[in-house]
Amino acid sequence: MDKIKLERYAELKKIVKEAEEEMDPLKGEILEMMGDNEEVDTDFGKFVVSHRRTWTYPEEIKNREDQLKRDKKSCEQLGTADYVENSTLMFKENKE
């Protein structure tokens, strides 16, 4: 096992986590600062405000979704549903 690669991966995961924690509040501040401007060009890049809709459905649809989830779970348990298993890498930092 190449310990150097493992250590580097762990180090990069930590850097990404710290960067995301710093970016989250900045994102809100920048959106507020941009106001009605949809785009702001800078010498280091362009900031664009995009809009995404979030839908809320009637109770009848939510109930049907819940029933579908239960039906899917039943198929999984009965073995009538097929699946594909993929490998992924997870890393959990040691708590100090």
Image (cartoon, helix red, strand yellow):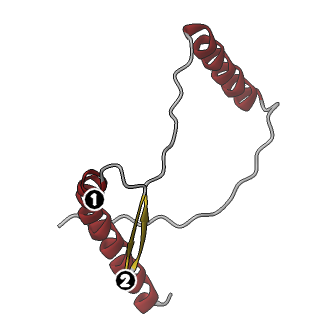
Where residue 90 sits in the image (x, y, percent)? 47, 64
Extreme-left residue of the structure: 96
Q: Earlier in the sequence, mark 1 or mark 2?
A: 1
Q: Is residue 64 above or below residue 84?
A: above
Q: What residue appears at the point 51 percent right and 42 percent down from the top-left corner? A: 52
Q: What residue appears at the point 33 percent right and 80 percent down from the top-left corner? A: 11
Q: Secondary structure at mark 1?
A: helix
Extreme-top residue of the structure: 60
Q: Is residue 20 left or right of residue 70?
A: left
Query: Which dot, 1 or 2, sits closer to the camera?
Result: 2
Q: Read off the residue under disc 1.
A: 30
Please tell me in which quadrant of the rendered image residue 73 appears: top right
Please identify the quadrant where the C terminus is shown.
bottom left
Extreme-front residue of the structure: 36
Q: Is residue 44 above or below residue 47?
A: below
Q: How many marks?
A: 2
Q: Residues within 10 Å of mark 1 (few under 14, many from 20)?
A: few
Q: What residue appears at the point 58 percent right and 64 percent down from the top-left corner? A: 88
Where residue 85 sits in the image (x, y, percent)? 71, 54
On residue 45, the disc is: none
Q: Read off the residue under disc 2.
A: 43
Q: Are marks 1 and 2 in contact (CB under 8 Å)?
A: no
Q: What residue appears at the point 81 percent right and 40 percent down from the top-left corner? A: 82
Q: Is residue 64 above or below residue 14?
A: above
Q: Secondary structure at mark 2?
A: loop
User: Hey, what amino acid is under mark 2?
Assistant: Asp
Please tell me in which quadrant of the rendered image residue 12 appears: bottom left
Please tell me in which quadrant of the rendered image residue 18 appears: bottom left
Q: CA distance from mark 1 to mark 2?
A: 16 Å
